[in-house]
Image (cartoon, coloured by chain):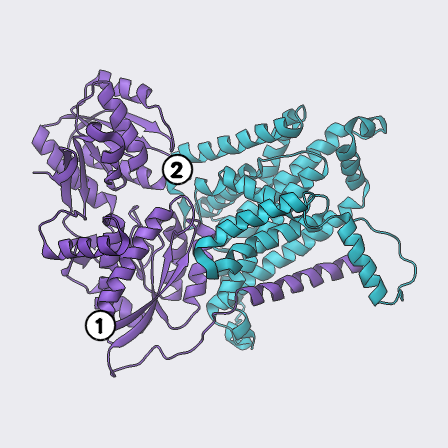
Chain colours: A purple, B cyan
Amino acid sequence: MRNSFKRVYLLISVLMVVMLAACGEDDTNTSNASEKSEGPVSAKIGVISYMTGPGAAYGEAITNGFNLALDEINEKGDVKIELIIEDSAGKQDQALTVAQKLMSSDDIVALLGPTLSTEMNVVGPEADINGIPIMGTSTTAAGIPQIGEYVFRNSIPESLAIPAALEKAVNKYGAKKVAILYGNDDLFTQSGYDTMKAEAENMGLEIVTIETFQKGQSDYNAQLTKIKDLQPDLILASALYNEGAVIMDQARKMGIDLPFVGGNGFNSPQVIEIAGEASEGLIVATPWFGEKDDPKVQEFVKKYESAYGHKPDQFAAQAYDALYIMAEGLKNAGEADRDALRDALAEIKDLDGILGKFSFDEDGDVIMEPTVLIIKDGAFQQFE
Amino acid sequence: MLGVILNPYHLQIVSFILINIILGISIYITLSSGQLSLGNAGFMGIGAYTSALLTINFDLPIFLGIILGAVVAGVFGILIGIPALRLSGVYLAIATLGFGEVIRVIFVNWESITQGSIGLSGIPHLGRELFKSFQITGFDPDMLGLKNNQFIYLLVVLTLLLVNILLIWFFIRQNKSRVGRAFAAIKMDEKAAESMGINITYYKVLSFTQGAILAGFAGALYAHVMAYISPADFAYHRAVDILIFSIFGGSELIWGAIFGATFMTILPEALRFISDYRYMIYGVVLIAMMAFRPQGIIDVSLLNWFKKKLKIKRGGSLGIRTKKYN
């Protein structure tokens, strides 16, 4: 028995040593972060992004957006930022460990990310306790900025996007009866549905039916037949674009010509690619519209396309703006200090970005006017 | 000195390793009686949700919550274990995999209690609660030269370490007892074991339930270390991850599960410097292992070889020792 105890201790101590050796190389505890007054403020910002696994495309767009903004900001020279990008693989436990890694390094003044709202639910409270400002660029679920006073986001939540789209659609088509369709096994679509339902009730619309589907489902005929029989004026679909596009395709084949109102996840050029003509009539509200008649937006699109070979999406644009917000915060704070940066961030008002004029409310949530778009003639157009 | 070594990042990884070791043992126990169960993610979910809901809604102390989580998972283990006895091999694997999915779908759809896929946040954190009780006694981490959050994670790691040592000790003892011999006999040949007078029903349900209790226990600990859970945490990916811990390390010995869990948790972190390729390497390691060492890294002969080496080093001063097969 004593021997087995000994062996346990031996094993554990060996493991600890191995582990410390394996991941302890980059512990820089230098404290040159707070260089006051002289020259521009220089700061390190940690980025947690979803770069490996099924959702890697999001992480890639986000880091591309950061890198593009980083070059511009450092060229301007008001502040000097260094990004330390780490992968979370879309998993909460990895997001948390990597956040610990970034937070424990004293010269990192803020965190950007993580990509998913589920990850933010784990990382947010930890960052708040450690007193490091954290800003999500793609976390749209309800309740994220309310985690704590160090938690911010610049991605417009569903509670802002969906009502805007719904209101315009209802006014245009004079809708009275709506049907709701949503994916119930995903945080994103579930929280979109909650907003849709609340908003529809708020506007006094009659909800004729609420149908659910699961991620990766390929046949929606049962739900759509029911919706068709009930004859609503409008279909509210809280779906991610890959399922959403298939839903629209099957609906059109079945002879449902109603306009669809979607959430943030439905807003992707991929919908047009997958569903083709069937995607006509999809209405979404988005902070990002690449065809906007704004020189800033056009310049960003051009730069992004020449750097990465394809058009930027909403996630890249939000990340791009997020780093500008951080830069503005650092400039106003005047020093690379976590608390000073938090206070400076909270005071940001009407900052001009490619998404529009940006402010934080008292929780650290977004105040912004989203653009409502409709798919018409095979492209997203502004919906009037 | 202590404050420099104990980086919260490292402590966090160690605490995940320790939780994963419990999960690895949970599948090792069911495998040790020859049953391949993929339902451990489901049991883990039951433990996690039970403990989280009890501590959030009824302000139960965390330790009671964790124990109740394990107990409830164990009850489900008995309920599933008895009918599942008729199945063996892949059929049992499929049935238990189905059970895990059913549990996950229940978490998704029982919105009034589990908040659906939005998940449960605000679960009391193991370390922070322990820290609070330490503060009451007037203890200040500064006395050890530690920062508050270092101390919090140190507490988590120490608690988990203690739990792990107790569990490993218990299962090593059990392996050498009548129960362990019965498990091994059933694994070798069910019919032969039965004809030797071993009550197969009892021992199979026992090992299945032990696995369920451990998985539920690990799940409850996970919930209180993460402070947030959602049904996606307990999907079949998790079941496969858990299985890999034991299969990779070697499913014949408890040390295999421990080694597998440790190695598989460290690997993605240690490979961080090649960021984009790390999961590719993870996959390659698995394939290579299956090709060259299908029985897992640690098996009986490797352990015996180690023991021999140790003996030679000690110059045989221990004299005659009885052979051990743990």
Mark 2 falls on what kind of element? helix
* Residue B213 rendering spot, x and y as whole percentages: 62, 41
The answer to whether A299 is drawn above or below residue B5 in the figure is: above
Frontmost residue, A197 versus A110: A110
Residue B116 is marked as 2
- The reply to whether residue A247 is visible in this rendering is yes
Instruction: Residue at 30%, 56% (x, y): give it.
Output: A64
Frontmost residue, B4 versus A339: B4
User: Which amino acid, mark 2?
Assistant: Gly
Which residue appears farthest toward the bottom when viewing the image? A38
User: Badge 1 sits on which subunit?
Assistant: A
Please give the count of numbered marks on the rendered protein.
Answer: 2
Is the residue marked by circle 1 packed among few (<14), some (14-19), or many (20+) residues within 10 Å?
some
Instruction: Residue at 85%, 64% (x, y): give it.
Output: B312
Distance Cα–Cα, label 2 vs label 1 = 42 Å
Which residue appears farthest toward the top when viewing the image? A229
The answer to whether A37 is drawn above or below residue B263 in the figure is: below
Frontmost residue, B318 versus B313: B313
Q: Seen in the image, is B140 located left or right of residue A197?
A: right
The answer to whether A145 is drawn above or below residue B67 in the figure is: below
Q: On the image, numbered disc 1 is attached to which residue?
A: A331
Corner quadrant of residue B202: top right
